[in-house]
Amino acid sequence: MCGIAAYIGQKEAAPIILDFIKKLEYRGYDSCGIATLNGSLTYKKGTGKIDDVDQKINFLNLKGNIGIGHTRWATHGEPSDKNAHPHFSCEGNIAIVHNGIIENSEELKKILIKGGHEFRSETDTEVVVHLIEDLINEGNTMEEAFAKTLKLIQGAFAIVAMNKNEPNRLYVVKQSSPLVLGVGDNEIFVASDVLPIQLHTNKVVYLQDGDFAVVTNNDYKIKNLSEIKVNREITILSENLEEISKGDFEHFMLKEIYEQPESIKRAFKGRIDKDNAKFGGLNLNIDDIKKIKRVVLTGCGTSWHACLIGGYYIEEISKIAAQVEYASEFRYKNPVLGKDDLLIVLSQSGETADSIAAIQEAKEKGVKTIGLVNVVGSPIARMVDGGIYLHAGHEIGVASTKTFTSHLTALYLLSIYLGRINGNLSKEKAKEMLNDLENLPDKIKETFNSVEEIKKIANKYFKSKNALYLGRHYNFPVALEGALKLKEISYIHAEGYPAAEMKHGPIALIDENMPVIVIAPEDRLYSKVMSNIQEVKSRKGKVIVVTTDESKNGFDEIIKIPKVSEFLMPIISVVPVQLLAYYIAKERNCDIDKPRNLAKSVTVE
Ligand code: M6R
């Protein structure tokens, strides 16, 4: 949440920072701002998405070779000009941008106000800049004041600060929120992730929790919070820069839905070995695997939905007990964990605060942790004991699509691997399952044949106020995911249920205005799902069926999907529900890639 950026070097800072915050806009987009130093500190900020704000106030008028920028997702204080970052000290000499939450801001604010500081925003961030100012007024240097401030604040923070009286230095810190330095020739870039940096330099330094650094145009000195110098190695990014563009698609979300045949291929490429799966970075030896008695899967949002299906895979394919937990709840239930457990964390961004906390909980209890993560080098990827990268490519649309199917692909392979090693899956079955997986990308392409039908359905139902999604077994989490997609991007209230649960309550909602989307492939529960559909029809609900069954009619609408094995069906059946949400949101003129109130990376609790 929130993207921060900074530059120090020989070039004009504002164009670079503007480009950076635009590339970080997926992290939050309710307001934005930039400050530069050119003898004096100048700044511009405003409410709204970056392009709109820039059009009004023209960020490029800001001059100077050093500057900081921010794109905000509001936590403390509504989206407004005054709450937009950067924030300034009373005398206006110091400017800061911040991503995270200062948990003790209220107490600190009271003390600072008593000491005469004047607050201009409702943010938690502003306390930081006044604390630095206060400590400088007491006789500390900027570096000492910055270091002392870090000991006074609690919470999650990535901060960049600059001081008019030190025009050649940036001060940065990372604690729980991500921050990366990019090292160029006589220039240093700072950003919340490598995405904007990689176009300027392939040398990056991933700061670690507790790192604070004084950055000049050709040097950076990193210390920890105890002010002891630490060395962080430079990571060289791979040369294959992925272009971040929508191509011919109107939205990133649509592009990412259509990328799924390729992103799935990348998730299994190099990981199939005749009758088993193979992984490079799992860091689990055969004895470790044989000892596993229980797998706990955790994540948030779409990643949690993928965990639910992963839990079914692990029980059914590997024959190991599986338990699925919301990452946001996990640590608070003081979970009983032991050395024979394995924690698997799913995350696209690799920086979700709740998922990080779940890993910390497991680590404290001595449990091995595995991360299934998309963003290479992200905090979760670096803190787990081993992992599988999804290689789905950048996912820019705030609503996750391709990483859901890549997560399922990785979980399917992992279940095969665990099942083969612990002797619960035969060679023959594994071979057949791996062969099915290799054919899956072409099957995904077949689902796109239904797009015209989906557009018609979207056009018919886009004014609905509510929707229900039903599915059973592997397709129940797909129902949850379909409902989440619809809520996120079209703002229609939607709920997902196991189809058989409907009669235990939600059936009371059914009337002629209620579209009910049923995921009903011809699997072992097909006839039971058909009975559930009849219960909806008898109450005049509108039934939209996603099915493999060519012959069925009598429903209000049918979306055809190709036949695949039961295990792989959720990877197929989710595609039409992603497309349905997309086209409904389009009919409603919603901002599909930047839905209201959301951000791609949720780095606060
Ligand atoms: O980056 P993560 O996978 O850890 O993110 C988890 C959720 O925040 C994320 O899936 C969210 O629910 C998406 N907006 C879903 O489309």
Image (spheres, rainbow, N blue to C red):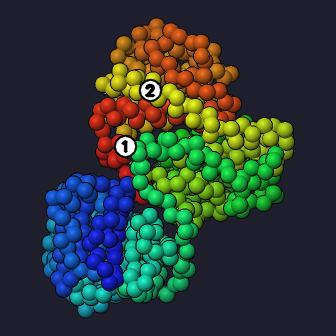
- Count of numbered circles in the view: 2
Residue toward you, 184 or 84: 184
Q: Is 557 placed left or right of 432 in the picture?
A: left
Q: Is residue 469 left or right of residue 597?
A: right
Examine the rendering and report whether any part of residue 133 can be seen: no
Tell me the quarter of the picture where residue 45 sits.
Answer: bottom left
Residue 572: x %, y % from top left: 58, 33
Image-quadrant location for residue 46: bottom left
Looking at the rendered structure, the secondary structure element under dot 2 is helix
* Whole-percent x, y for residue 117 in the image: 16, 75
Residue type (three-letter) at the residue carrying disc 1: Glu
- Whether label 2 lies within 8 Å of ligand 1 gets the answer no
Name the amino acid type tagged 2: Glu
Q: Give the residue drawn at x 64%, y 44%.
A: 409
Spot occupied by residue 266 in the image (x, y as percentages of width and height): 62, 51
What SS does tag 1 mark? loop
Q: Residue at x 65, y 26 (%)?
A: 563
> Which disc number belongs to residue 275?
none
Kindly indicate the quadrant of the structure image that contains residue 178: bottom left
Q: Is mark 1 within 8 Å of ligand 1?
A: no
- In percent of the image, x 81 and y 57: which residue is there? 286
Q: Quadrant of the C terminus?
A: bottom left
Q: Residues within 10 Å of mark 1 (few under 14, many from 20)?
A: few
In front of the other: 312 or 543: 543
Dot 1 corresponds to which residue?
Answer: 250
Viewer-proximal residue, 156 or 1?
1
* Residue 219 visible from this viewpoint: yes
Residue on which disc 2 sits: 452
| Real-space Cα separation, disc 1 to disc 2, in angstroms | 16 Å
Q: Quadrant of the N terminus?
A: bottom left
Above or below, 210 against 512 in this view is: below
x%, y% of residue 132?
27, 80
